[in-house]
């Protein structure tokens, strides 16, 4: 038997789960996230091994979900400098790169940006020829600088030839080891959003290496020899090599892991999912066992991008949320003690009143430490929990697509804050291991491949065009680590584009398969 180890790093806790080869959950644990992140991962894995008594030599596969990429962008820290080339002159010179970027993020990322000749029309027709001299001039000032390169061309998802050619020229000028992001491999059709996503991906290249190397180092230190995989934002997994190349896809994987884990633990395919952590609560939607994707462009660190993200509503309520007393009663958060809950919260001997303290006063959690919160009255605790649950109910209602009661699956260590009966909810599920659902979700072994492209159907067989798109999605899934025999198409969207000639449509295809496990 080859066990699976899933690890998910949150703002307050790092969770670990061990699953058997039939995906049954054997054991789960929670450890406090550390400032250096890797320490929390090491502690969580050590704890789950010690308490489960699973033979570490039988752990064949290890999966990680992490917020490291998200935090780097939000905090503007540890990002690579990026040299960016847009292929689009003369068509796009009126709009410079980094349009509407926050000034501090642009300063943290931008090394150099230029627009060079080239680009394509929506149907793949060439706008202008490439000019090698422009590329050479761009590279001339980068020879002694440590930068990542991002390249984006107009309508490159329709025809990537110019991006590929420019990348080859840059390697000839700067060497084969230069880190290059090509936009047609990152985002959809929209030029500026795809450009932004490509620049962010390039800025995360070193972070991607740290994620992969850090996880693999922690496993090696613990004597675990396992294939490693990493969570991405659509609820599926990717290999370490894929993660290092496309670290931007790890953005948003935490809430997605919880949603996937909620389905696996409950067996409910269509429901709302509420993941209550120590700092925030995330609400998502299960649609046919996968997270519902947002129809809006994803904003990352204040920058608009156009790769698809799970439809998540985050609210400032968690186990560590601070309760502020005032003359009018109290306010709930939005600040939290986070991973310091074990030293600052009253229930752990601290002096900061948190949501967890009020839950403990009502015997919802921490039953053996209730004497620590004896100074909180039951009436007060009732009022605090009622206010929290009213906010939760209102937020759940916002995520519904239709009227009527629907099921809710609770996950996360702070779920004891939530009532068993909620207006608008038909049934509340608290499955076994619900408090570590995100780690369970990380361990689930499916890999996806996507296509998001404009096709012209004029004079073409529609079925042949769709077949080509499906084959490309399948190929992308296999490249990301899926077993070729298991890949299937789970979603096809065809969006007619009336403003373009030739019966054009935007086609989105998603393929999903089981991990290719080398056993």
Image: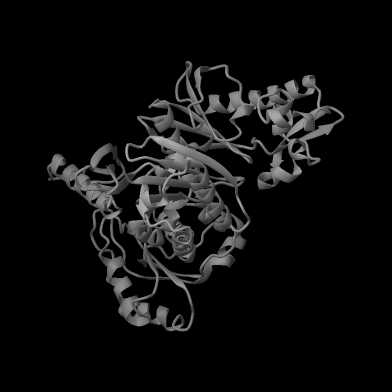
- Relative horizontal placement of residue 297, taking residue 36 as reference (left or right): left
Along the horizontal axis of the image, is 381 left or right of 124? right
* Foreground pick, 194 / 446: 446
Residue 24 to residue 470: above or below:
above
Q: Quadrant of residue 24?
A: top left
In this view, the residue in front, 242 or 435, is 435
> Which color mode does the image show?
one colour
Q: In which quadrant of the rendered view does residue 374 lie?
A: top right
Q: Position of residue 452 (x, y in %)?
A: 31, 47
Residue in the image at 84% along x and 32% along y: 326
Residue that protrudes farthest toward the right in the picture? 327
Which quadrant, please, contains the N terminus? top left
Q: How many marks?
A: 0
Return the x and y of residue 186 as percentages of the image width and height: 37, 56
| Residue 363 seen in the figure | yes
The residue shown at (45%, 52%) is 250
Residue at horizontal 53%, vertical 17%? 424
Give the image location of residue 135, x and y in percent: 36, 77
Which residue is painted at 47% across and 84% down in the image? 144
In the displayed structure, 209 sits above or below 28; it is below
Vertical placement of residue 44 versus 106, above or below: above
């Amino acid at each position: 038997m080859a066990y699976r180890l899933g690890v998910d790093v949150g703002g307050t806790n790092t969770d670990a789960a061990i699953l058997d080869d039939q995906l049954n959950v054997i054991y789960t644990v929670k450890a406090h996230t550390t400032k250096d992140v890797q320490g929390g991962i090491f502690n969580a894995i050590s704890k789950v091994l010690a308490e489960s008594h699973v033979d570490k030599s039988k752990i064949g596969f290890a999966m990680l979900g992490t917020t490291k990429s998200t935090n780097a962008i939000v905090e503007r820290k540890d990002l690579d400098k990026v040299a960016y080339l847009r292929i689009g002159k003369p068509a796009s010179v009126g709009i410079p790169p980094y349009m509407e970027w926050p000034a501090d993020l642009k300063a943290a990322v931008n090394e150099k940006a230029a627009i060079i000749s080239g680009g394509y029309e929506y149907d793949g027709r060439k706008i202008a020829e490439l000019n090698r001299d422009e590329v050479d001039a761009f590279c001339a000032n980068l020879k002694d600088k440590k930068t990542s390169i991002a390249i984006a061309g107009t309508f490159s998802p329709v025809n990537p030839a110019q991006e590929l050619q420019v990348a080859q020229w840059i390697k000839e000028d700067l060497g084969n080891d230069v880190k290059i992001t090509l936009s047609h491999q990152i985002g959809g059709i929209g030029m500026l959003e795809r450009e932004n996503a490509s620049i962010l991906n390039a800025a995360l290249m070193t972070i991607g290496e740290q994620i992969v190397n850090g996880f693999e180092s922690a496993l090696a230190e613990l004597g675990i020899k396992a294939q490693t995989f990493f969570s991405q934002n659509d609820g599926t997994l990717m290999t370490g090599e894929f993660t290092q190349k496309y670290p931007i896809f790890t953005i948003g994987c935490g809430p997605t892991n919880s949603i996937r884990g909620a389905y696996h633990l409950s067996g409910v395919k269509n429901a709302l999912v509420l993941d209550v952590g120590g700092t925030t609560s995330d609400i998502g939607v299960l649609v046919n066992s996968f997270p519902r994707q947002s129809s809006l462009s994803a904003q990352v660190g204040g920058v608009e991008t156009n790769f698809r993200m799970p439809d998540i509503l985050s609210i400032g309520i968690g186990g560590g949320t601070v309760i502020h007393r005032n003359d009018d009663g109290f306010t709930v958060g939005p600040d939290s003690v986070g991973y310091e809950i074990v030293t600052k919260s009253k229930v752990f001997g601290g002096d900061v009143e948190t949501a967890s303290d009020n839950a403990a006063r009502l015997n919802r959690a921490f039953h053996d430490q209730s004497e620590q919160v004896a100074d909180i009255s039951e009436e007060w605790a009732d009022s605090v929990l009622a206010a929290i649950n009213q906010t939760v109910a209102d937020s759940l209602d916002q995520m519904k697509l239709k009227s009527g009661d629907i099921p809710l699956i609770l996950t996360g260590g702070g779920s004891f804050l939530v009532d068993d009966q909620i207006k608008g909810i038909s049934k509340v599920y608290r499955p076994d291991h619900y408090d570590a659902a995100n780690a369970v979700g990380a361990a689930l072994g499916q890999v996806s491949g996507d296509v998001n492209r404009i096709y012209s159907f004029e004079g073409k067989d529609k079925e042949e065009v769709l077949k080509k798109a499906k084959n490309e999605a399948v190929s992308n899934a296999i490249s990301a680590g899926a077993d070729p025999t298991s890949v299937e198409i789970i979603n096809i969207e065809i969006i007619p584009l009336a403003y373009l000639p030739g019966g054009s449509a935007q086609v989105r295809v998603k393929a999903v398969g089981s991990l290719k496990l080398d056993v």
